[in-house]
Image: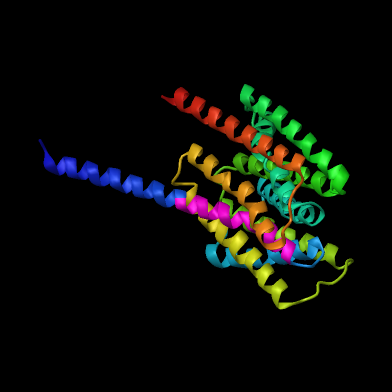
Protein backbone atom coordinates (compact mmCIF):
# COMPACT_ATOMS: atom_id res chain seq x y z
CA UNK A 1 0.00 0.00 0.00
CA UNK A 2 1.37 3.41 -1.01
CA UNK A 3 1.34 5.35 2.26
CA UNK A 4 2.41 8.57 0.51
CA UNK A 5 -0.64 8.40 -1.78
CA UNK A 6 -2.92 7.79 1.23
CA UNK A 7 -1.35 10.72 3.07
CA UNK A 8 -1.77 12.95 0.02
CA UNK A 9 -5.44 11.97 -0.34
CA UNK A 10 -6.05 12.59 3.37
CA UNK A 11 -4.43 16.01 3.07
CA UNK A 12 -6.65 16.84 0.08
CA UNK A 13 -9.79 15.77 1.96
CA UNK A 14 -8.76 17.85 4.98
CA UNK A 15 -8.04 20.87 2.74
CA UNK A 16 -11.43 20.49 1.03
CA UNK A 17 -13.21 20.28 4.38
CA UNK A 18 -11.36 23.37 5.62
CA UNK A 19 -12.28 25.22 2.42
CA UNK A 20 -15.98 24.38 2.89
CA UNK A 21 -15.85 25.32 6.58
CA UNK A 22 -14.30 28.69 5.74
CA UNK A 23 -16.93 29.22 3.04
CA UNK A 24 -19.80 28.42 5.40
CA UNK A 25 -18.44 30.78 8.04
CA UNK A 26 -18.09 33.53 5.43
CA UNK A 27 -21.66 32.99 4.15
CA UNK A 28 -23.05 32.90 7.69
CA UNK A 29 -21.14 36.06 8.56
CA UNK A 30 -22.43 37.75 5.41
CA UNK A 31 -26.05 36.82 6.24
CA UNK A 32 -25.68 38.13 9.81
CA UNK A 33 -24.25 41.43 8.56
CA UNK A 34 -27.04 41.74 5.99
CA UNK A 35 -29.59 41.06 8.73
CA UNK A 36 -28.46 44.18 10.62
CA UNK A 37 -29.68 46.50 7.86
CA UNK A 38 -33.16 46.96 9.30
CA UNK A 39 -31.77 47.87 12.73
CA UNK A 40 -29.34 50.54 11.48
CA UNK A 41 -31.98 52.02 9.16
CA UNK A 42 -34.43 52.30 12.07
CA UNK A 43 -31.76 54.05 14.19
CA UNK A 44 -31.24 56.85 11.66
CA UNK A 45 -33.84 59.61 11.79
CA UNK A 46 -33.41 60.69 8.16
CA UNK A 47 -35.70 60.49 5.17
CA UNK A 48 -35.11 57.17 3.32
CA UNK A 49 -33.33 58.57 0.24
CA UNK A 50 -30.74 60.35 2.41
CA UNK A 51 -30.08 57.03 4.18
CA UNK A 52 -29.95 55.00 0.96
CA UNK A 53 -27.73 57.56 -0.80
CA UNK A 54 -25.24 57.91 2.05
CA UNK A 55 -25.13 54.14 2.60
CA UNK A 56 -24.42 53.45 -1.06
CA UNK A 57 -21.84 56.24 -1.31
CA UNK A 58 -19.91 54.80 1.65
CA UNK A 59 -20.31 51.24 0.34
CA UNK A 60 -19.10 52.32 -3.12
CA UNK A 61 -15.96 53.88 -1.64
CA UNK A 62 -15.29 50.76 0.45
CA UNK A 63 -15.75 48.41 -2.53
CA UNK A 64 -13.65 50.60 -4.82
CA UNK A 65 -10.77 50.55 -2.32
CA UNK A 66 -11.17 46.78 -1.95
CA UNK A 67 -11.42 45.95 -5.67
CA UNK A 68 -8.93 48.65 -6.77
CA UNK A 69 -9.44 47.90 -10.47
CA UNK A 70 -13.18 47.33 -11.06
CA UNK A 71 -14.27 45.86 -14.39
CA UNK A 72 -16.74 48.40 -15.76
CA UNK A 73 -17.84 47.48 -19.29
CA UNK A 74 -20.96 49.67 -19.21
CA UNK A 75 -22.61 47.12 -21.45
CA UNK A 76 -26.39 47.09 -21.60
CA UNK A 77 -26.48 44.02 -19.36
CA UNK A 78 -24.05 45.36 -16.74
CA UNK A 79 -25.72 48.76 -16.67
CA UNK A 80 -29.21 47.24 -16.43
CA UNK A 81 -28.08 44.87 -13.67
CA UNK A 82 -26.52 47.75 -11.73
CA UNK A 83 -29.67 49.86 -12.09
CA UNK A 84 -31.80 46.94 -10.83
CA UNK A 85 -29.44 46.55 -7.86
CA UNK A 86 -29.63 50.30 -7.19
CA UNK A 87 -33.43 50.09 -7.24
CA UNK A 88 -33.24 47.23 -4.72
CA UNK A 89 -31.13 49.33 -2.36
CA UNK A 90 -33.37 52.40 -2.62
CA UNK A 91 -36.66 50.53 -2.34
CA UNK A 92 -35.53 48.39 0.61
CA UNK A 93 -34.58 51.44 2.69
CA UNK A 94 -37.86 53.14 1.75
CA UNK A 95 -39.82 50.03 2.77
CA UNK A 96 -38.02 49.85 6.13
CA UNK A 97 -39.12 53.41 6.88
CA UNK A 98 -42.77 52.69 6.01
CA UNK A 99 -43.34 49.24 7.53
CA UNK A 100 -41.79 46.95 10.13
CA UNK A 101 -38.29 45.55 9.56
CA UNK A 102 -39.78 42.03 9.52
CA UNK A 103 -42.26 42.92 6.78
CA UNK A 104 -39.60 44.64 4.68
CA UNK A 105 -37.13 41.75 4.67
CA UNK A 106 -39.62 38.88 4.54
CA UNK A 107 -41.62 40.34 1.65
CA UNK A 108 -38.34 40.80 -0.23
CA UNK A 109 -37.29 37.24 0.54
CA UNK A 110 -39.43 35.80 -2.27
CA UNK A 111 -36.65 36.90 -4.66
CA UNK A 112 -35.19 33.37 -5.24
CA UNK A 113 -38.55 32.19 -6.59
CA UNK A 114 -38.96 35.36 -8.67
CA UNK A 115 -35.53 34.59 -10.16
CA UNK A 116 -36.77 31.19 -11.35
CA UNK A 117 -39.84 32.70 -12.98
CA UNK A 118 -37.98 35.63 -14.58
CA UNK A 119 -35.39 33.14 -15.78
CA UNK A 120 -38.07 31.27 -17.70
CA UNK A 121 -38.58 34.36 -19.84
CA UNK A 122 -35.12 35.95 -19.93
CA UNK A 123 -32.89 32.85 -19.74
CA UNK A 124 -35.26 30.34 -21.36
CA UNK A 125 -35.14 28.15 -18.26
CA UNK A 126 -38.33 26.17 -17.69
CA UNK A 127 -39.75 26.76 -14.17
CA UNK A 128 -40.08 23.63 -12.08
CA UNK A 129 -43.26 22.46 -10.39
CA UNK A 130 -41.88 23.21 -6.93
CA UNK A 131 -41.13 26.78 -8.04
CA UNK A 132 -44.72 27.35 -9.19
CA UNK A 133 -45.99 25.89 -5.90
CA UNK A 134 -43.56 28.10 -3.96
CA UNK A 135 -44.86 31.17 -5.80
CA UNK A 136 -48.41 30.17 -4.84
CA UNK A 137 -47.34 29.82 -1.20
CA UNK A 138 -45.57 33.20 -1.33
CA UNK A 139 -48.79 34.77 -2.60
CA UNK A 140 -50.60 33.27 0.40
CA UNK A 141 -47.92 34.68 2.70
CA UNK A 142 -48.27 38.10 1.07
CA UNK A 143 -52.03 38.08 1.64
CA UNK A 144 -51.39 37.51 5.35
CA UNK A 145 -48.90 40.40 5.39
CA UNK A 146 -51.28 42.77 3.66
CA UNK A 147 -54.13 41.81 6.01
CA UNK A 148 -51.91 43.15 8.81
CA UNK A 149 -50.63 46.13 6.84
CA UNK A 150 -54.13 47.41 6.03
CA UNK A 151 -54.90 47.55 9.75
CA UNK A 152 -51.50 48.99 10.77
CA UNK A 153 -51.16 51.53 7.94
CA UNK A 154 -48.16 49.75 6.37
CA UNK A 155 -49.66 49.17 2.92
CA UNK A 156 -47.20 51.48 1.11
CA UNK A 157 -44.15 50.00 2.84
CA UNK A 158 -45.25 46.42 2.24
CA UNK A 159 -45.97 47.09 -1.44
CA UNK A 160 -42.54 48.69 -1.94
CA UNK A 161 -40.90 45.72 -0.16
CA UNK A 162 -42.47 43.33 -2.69
CA UNK A 163 -41.25 45.50 -5.59
CA UNK A 164 -37.79 45.51 -4.00
CA UNK A 165 -37.80 41.71 -4.11
CA UNK A 166 -38.62 41.75 -7.83
CA UNK A 167 -35.85 44.33 -8.47
CA UNK A 168 -33.36 42.11 -6.64
CA UNK A 169 -34.47 39.09 -8.67
CA UNK A 170 -34.09 41.06 -11.91
CA UNK A 171 -30.57 42.04 -10.86
CA UNK A 172 -29.63 38.39 -10.31
CA UNK A 173 -31.05 37.27 -13.66
CA UNK A 174 -29.30 40.10 -15.53
CA UNK A 175 -26.06 39.22 -13.72
CA UNK A 176 -26.39 35.61 -14.89
CA UNK A 177 -26.89 36.74 -18.49
CA UNK A 178 -23.49 38.47 -18.46
CA UNK A 179 -20.53 36.44 -19.66
CA UNK A 180 -17.58 36.48 -17.25
CA UNK A 181 -19.50 38.79 -14.92
CA UNK A 182 -17.66 40.33 -11.99
CA UNK A 183 -20.29 40.50 -9.19
CA UNK A 184 -18.35 42.95 -7.01
CA UNK A 185 -17.81 45.37 -9.89
CA UNK A 186 -21.49 45.24 -10.82
CA UNK A 187 -22.45 45.83 -7.18
CA UNK A 188 -20.02 48.77 -7.02
CA UNK A 189 -21.62 50.29 -10.12
CA UNK A 190 -25.05 49.71 -8.59
CA UNK A 191 -24.08 51.59 -5.45
CA UNK A 192 -22.72 54.47 -7.53
CA UNK A 193 -26.06 54.68 -9.35
CA UNK A 194 -28.00 54.43 -6.06
CA UNK A 195 -25.94 57.22 -4.47
CA UNK A 196 -26.45 59.47 -7.51
CA UNK A 197 -30.21 58.85 -7.78
CA UNK A 198 -30.82 59.22 -4.04
CA UNK A 199 -28.64 62.33 -3.94
CA UNK A 200 -30.68 64.04 -6.66
CA UNK A 201 -34.00 63.13 -5.01
CA UNK A 202 -32.71 64.28 -1.60
CA UNK A 203 -32.09 67.78 -2.97
CA UNK A 204 -35.87 68.25 -2.90
CA UNK A 205 -36.43 66.71 0.55
CA UNK A 206 -35.58 67.64 4.13
CA UNK A 207 -31.81 67.70 4.79
CA UNK A 208 -30.53 65.07 7.24
CA UNK A 209 -29.87 66.07 10.84
CA UNK A 210 -26.31 64.99 11.64
CA UNK A 211 -25.72 63.40 15.06
CA UNK A 212 -23.11 60.99 16.47
CA UNK A 213 -25.69 58.16 16.41
CA UNK A 214 -26.71 58.79 12.80
CA UNK A 215 -23.08 59.03 11.64
CA UNK A 216 -22.17 55.79 13.43
CA UNK A 217 -25.21 53.97 12.03
CA UNK A 218 -24.77 55.19 8.44
CA UNK A 219 -21.06 54.30 8.56
CA UNK A 220 -21.94 50.81 9.83
CA UNK A 221 -24.51 50.44 7.03
CA UNK A 222 -22.03 51.36 4.30
CA UNK A 223 -18.86 49.68 5.55
CA UNK A 224 -20.09 46.68 7.55
CA UNK A 225 -23.65 45.83 6.47
CA UNK A 226 -22.97 46.33 2.74
CA UNK A 227 -19.22 46.53 2.03
CA UNK A 228 -17.81 43.84 4.31
CA UNK A 229 -20.84 41.61 3.69
CA UNK A 230 -20.21 41.78 -0.08
CA UNK A 231 -16.59 40.72 0.42
CA UNK A 232 -17.64 37.78 2.62
CA UNK A 233 -20.30 36.78 0.08
CA UNK A 234 -17.89 36.79 -2.87
CA UNK A 235 -15.43 34.69 -0.81
CA UNK A 236 -17.95 32.24 0.60
CA UNK A 237 -20.15 31.58 -2.45
CA UNK A 238 -17.20 29.98 -4.27
CA UNK A 239 -16.56 27.54 -1.41
CA UNK A 240 -19.99 26.17 -0.54
CA UNK A 241 -22.55 24.05 -2.32
CA UNK A 242 -25.77 25.60 -3.61
CA UNK A 243 -27.73 23.89 -0.83
CA UNK A 244 -25.39 25.23 1.86
CA UNK A 245 -25.74 28.70 0.36
CA UNK A 246 -29.54 28.51 0.52
CA UNK A 247 -29.54 27.28 4.11
CA UNK A 248 -27.20 30.00 5.36
CA UNK A 249 -29.19 32.67 3.49
CA UNK A 250 -32.17 31.94 5.77
CA UNK A 251 -30.22 33.59 8.60
CA UNK A 252 -30.93 37.08 7.24
CA UNK A 253 -34.77 37.15 7.29
CA UNK A 254 -34.84 35.40 10.67
CA UNK A 255 -32.34 37.64 12.47
CA UNK A 256 -33.28 40.97 10.85
CA UNK A 257 -36.47 41.53 12.91
CA UNK A 258 -34.79 40.04 16.00
CA UNK A 259 -32.11 42.77 16.11
CA UNK A 260 -34.75 45.46 15.62
CA UNK A 261 -36.93 44.02 18.40
CA UNK A 262 -34.03 43.79 20.86
CA UNK A 263 -33.03 47.43 20.33
CA UNK A 264 -36.29 49.24 19.45
CA UNK A 265 -38.99 46.84 20.68
CA UNK A 266 -40.69 46.79 17.25
CA UNK A 267 -42.95 43.72 16.90
CA UNK A 268 -44.63 42.65 13.64
CA UNK A 269 -48.29 41.62 13.68
CA UNK A 270 -49.40 38.03 14.17
CA UNK A 271 -50.51 37.57 10.55
CA UNK A 272 -47.19 39.04 9.35
CA UNK A 273 -45.26 36.50 11.44
CA UNK A 274 -47.35 33.68 9.99
CA UNK A 275 -46.94 35.07 6.48
CA UNK A 276 -43.18 35.27 7.00
CA UNK A 277 -43.02 31.64 8.07
CA UNK A 278 -44.99 30.66 4.96
CA UNK A 279 -42.62 32.59 2.66
CA UNK A 280 -39.41 31.31 4.29
CA UNK A 281 -40.70 27.72 4.21
CA UNK A 282 -41.79 28.02 0.57
CA UNK A 283 -38.45 29.40 -0.61
CA UNK A 284 -36.41 26.97 1.47
CA UNK A 285 -38.34 23.84 0.48
CA UNK A 286 -38.45 24.82 -3.20
CA UNK A 287 -34.71 25.54 -3.27
CA UNK A 288 -33.79 22.29 -1.52
CA UNK A 289 -35.95 20.21 -3.91
CA UNK A 290 -34.54 21.95 -7.00
CA UNK A 291 -30.93 21.52 -5.84
CA UNK A 292 -31.44 17.83 -5.05
CA UNK A 293 -33.05 17.27 -8.45
CA UNK A 294 -30.10 18.97 -10.14
CA UNK A 295 -27.70 16.79 -8.15
CA UNK A 296 -29.47 13.59 -9.19
CA UNK A 297 -29.52 14.72 -12.81
CA UNK A 298 -25.78 15.32 -12.79
CA UNK A 299 -24.96 11.95 -11.22
Q: Which residue occupies 80% across, 51% down?
A: 99
Magenta stretch?
25-43
Answer whether residue 73 is visible to the viewer in this image: no
Q: Is residue 88 visible?
A: yes
Quarter residue 16 falls in? top left
Q: Quadrant of residue 7?
A: top left
Q: Residue furthest left?
A: 1
Q: Residue 269, image x and y in percent?
A: 77, 45
In the displayed structure image, the side of residue 188 where residue 90 appears, left or right: right
Q: Is residue 89 magenta?
A: no
**Residue drawn at (82%, 42%), measured in percent from left and top?**
148
Q: Quadrant of the N terminus?
A: top left
Which residue is located at x 48 percent, y 50 percent? 236
x, y percent for residue 184? 57, 55
Q: Is 203 displayed left or right of 195 in the figure?
A: right
Is 128 drawn above or below residue 224 in the view shown? Answer: above
Amino acid sequence: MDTSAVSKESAQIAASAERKRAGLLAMAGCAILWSMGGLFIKLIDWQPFAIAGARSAIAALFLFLWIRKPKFTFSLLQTSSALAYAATMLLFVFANKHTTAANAILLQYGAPVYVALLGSYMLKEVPKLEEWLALLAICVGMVLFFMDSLAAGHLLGDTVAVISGFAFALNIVLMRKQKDADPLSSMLLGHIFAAMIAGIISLFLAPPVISPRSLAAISALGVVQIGLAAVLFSYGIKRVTALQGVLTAVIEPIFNPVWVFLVTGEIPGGKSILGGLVIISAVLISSVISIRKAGKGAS
